[in-house]
Image (cartoon, rainbow, N blue to C red):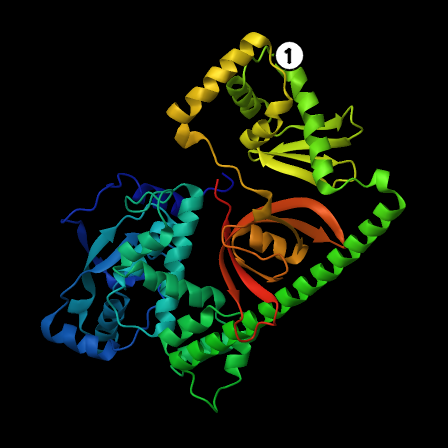
């Protein structure tokens, strides 16, 4: 029959009746050493065979070989899992000294359920052997690859649930190492360039030094390799190099921030000049910011008034609850009786009112926006009484839940270059270099608008000033560095 293999059948039979849990007793069998063959996955050095042969000749085989039933095409039935050095020492005694009493060896029969478990058993069986750093790195790589493949296939290895927990923690438990040792080894395996890997193998650099270097970029590693052999590469020298790189990067960031601040200042001055010219030429078409905000709020209030009427909302408390549910992820147009044309956008608990040209006029939380338009909303007489009653009760029963209002003097609308926006928004860049022409104070809110090619993209992030550094050596006069954190609710 096509595809039939006696060896496959025998291998399958050998895996039947597998015991799930390890035990203190195990099955042994005396096997002809010439019915056993080496395992290609064993990477341990086979040094000291002469010494091992002399030991066995003197006192006998003290530890059984570890094998699995896996017939090969050559007719050998058992594949080694552990004890290859003992096996080769026994062959030496038989072949070179004709000591036939060593031809049969007691073997521990192992039954790994799959290839990954076999590889892991090999790693465990040889874990007590002292090997070179390079061999140890390869062994850990083999172990991690086997665990990762088993996890992908949904296999369980020796009772470990690979779907929960980190593989490096499981590898550490299997090998008796610390998780950090496994992580350091994999960092070298994955990141160290070949030239430095060769120096590690030759013991020209230490394992600790290799770990430090592995965290650097490839071009930085190449620069370190160029030191060899004129300079000894040590952990101390690598840490000094990293500190220098960090200081250079900080200096570059400071320079870019200063350039960004100067560019923003130039853009703002040009915009102000253009606005002033427009106001002189067409004063009726250029209302000031306060007037625009008033128009936007009035128009939004007209829009909400329809909701008040249709939903039979009787008071401010009901309106706040309605607004929190109604205005989530909502976008719509605004056309006011006062001539304001624009749109509103609701996201992440905020309501933003903008003009048709995408210029943002007002941005407030849903509750604060409701407060801002509350005086423009008309409730019926009976509802007004209820509202009055609620306004008396709110300070008494819900005082903690009523947020304080932020004054306009503490909010600054600023532009932020696209290249910095994500870093600032996520908190990775927790500072801003700015010209202090606004008398920044701790607690101020920075409303930062992303700019690309001189235009706003529509993305906005808000940060609160928690620290101000100015008058410091290296800072130009009139500039300051603002420490930032997420805006508190």
Task: Locate residue 104: give its quadrant.
Answer: bottom left
Above or below: residue 85 compared with residue 389: below
Question: Is 388 situated left or right of 455 in this image?
Answer: left
Above or below: residue 385 compared with residue 142: above
Dot 1 falls on a residue whose secondary structure is helix
Question: Is 107 situated left or right of 195 in this image?
Answer: left
Number of marks drawn: 1
How far across and how far down the image is residue 354, in percent? 71, 36
- 420 or 88, nearer to the observer: 420
**Residue reaching furthest to the bottom:** 230
For mark 1, what is the residue?
A: 309
How far across and how far down the image is residue 442, in percent? 50, 54
**Residue reaching furthest to the left:** 59
**Residue reaching furthest to the right:** 281
Residue 72 visible? The answer is: yes
- 152 or 437, nearer to the observer: 437
Question: Is 24 situated left or right of 312 in this image?
Answer: left
x 65%, y 23%: residue: 376
How far across and how far down the image is residue 355, in percent? 75, 36
x 81%, y 41%: residue: 286
How far across and how far down the image is residue 466, in percent? 48, 55
Circle 1: is it few (<14), some (14-19), or many (20+) Cα within 10 Å? Answer: few
x 80%, y 28%: residue: 339
Above or below: residue 418 compared with residue 63: above
- 44 or 10, nearer to the observer: 44
Residue 40 visible? The answer is: no
x 60%, y 14%: residue: 379
């Amino acid at each position: 029959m096509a595809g039939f293999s006696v060896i496959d059948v025998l291998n399958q039979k050998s895996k039947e009746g597998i015991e799930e849990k390890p035990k203190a007793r195990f099955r042994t069998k005396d096997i002809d050493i010439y019915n056993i063959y080496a395992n290609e996955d064993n990477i341990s050095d086979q040094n000291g065979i002469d010494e091992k042969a002399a030991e066995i000749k003197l006192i006998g085989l003290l530890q059984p070989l570890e094998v699995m039933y896996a017939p090969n095409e050559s007719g050998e039935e058992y594949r080694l899992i552990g004890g290859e050095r003992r096996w080769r020492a026994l062959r030496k005694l038989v072949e070179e000294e004709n000591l036939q009493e060593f031809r049969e060896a007691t073997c521990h029969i192992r039954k790994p359920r799959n290839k990954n478990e076999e590889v892991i058993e090999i790693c465990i069986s040889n874990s007590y052997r002292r090997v070179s750093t390079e061999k140890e790195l390869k062994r850990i790589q083999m172990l991690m690859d086997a665990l990762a493949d088993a996890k992908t296939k949904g296999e369980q290895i020796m009772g470990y649930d690979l779907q929960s927990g980190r593989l490096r923690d499981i590898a550490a438990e299997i090998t008796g190492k610390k998780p950090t040792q496994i992580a350091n080894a994999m960092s070298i395996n994955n990141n160290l360039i070949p030239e430095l890997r060769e120096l590690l193998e030759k013991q020209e650099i230490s394992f600790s030094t290799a770990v430090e270097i592995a965290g650097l970029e490839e071009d930085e590693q190449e620069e370190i390799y160029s030191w060899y052999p004129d300079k000894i590469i040590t952990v101390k020298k690598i840490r000094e190099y990293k500190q220098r790189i960090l200081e250079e990067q900080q200096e570059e960031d400071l320079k870019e921030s200063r350039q960004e601040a100067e560019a923003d200042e130039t853009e703002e001055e040009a915009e102000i000049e253009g606005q002033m010219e427009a106001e002189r030429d067409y004063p009726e078409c250029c209302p000031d910011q306060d007037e625009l905000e008033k128009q936007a709020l009035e128009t939004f209030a007209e829009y909400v008034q329809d909701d008040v009427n249709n939903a039979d909302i009787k008071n401010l408390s009901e309106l706040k609850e309605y607004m929190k549910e109604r205005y989530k992820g909502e976008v719509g147009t605004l056309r006011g009786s006062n001539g304001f044309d624009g749109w509103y956008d609701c996201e992440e608990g905020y309501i933003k009112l903008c003009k048709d040209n995408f210029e943002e006029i007002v941005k407030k939380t849903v509750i604060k926006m409701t407060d801002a338009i509350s005086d423009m909303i008309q409730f019926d007489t009976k509802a007004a009484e209820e509202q009055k009653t609620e306004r008396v009760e709110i300070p008494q029963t819900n005082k903690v839940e009523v947020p304080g209002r932020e004054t306009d003097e503490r909010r600054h609308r600023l532009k932020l270059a696209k290249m910095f926006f994500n870093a600032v928004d996520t908190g990775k860049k927790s500072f801003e270099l700015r010209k202090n022409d606004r008398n920044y104070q701790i607690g101020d809110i920075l409303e930062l608008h992303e700019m690309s090619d001189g235009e706003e993209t529509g993305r906005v992030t808000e940060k609160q000033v928690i620290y101000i550094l100015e008058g410091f050596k290296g800072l130009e006069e009139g500039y300051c560095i603002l420490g930032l954190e997420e805006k508190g609710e």
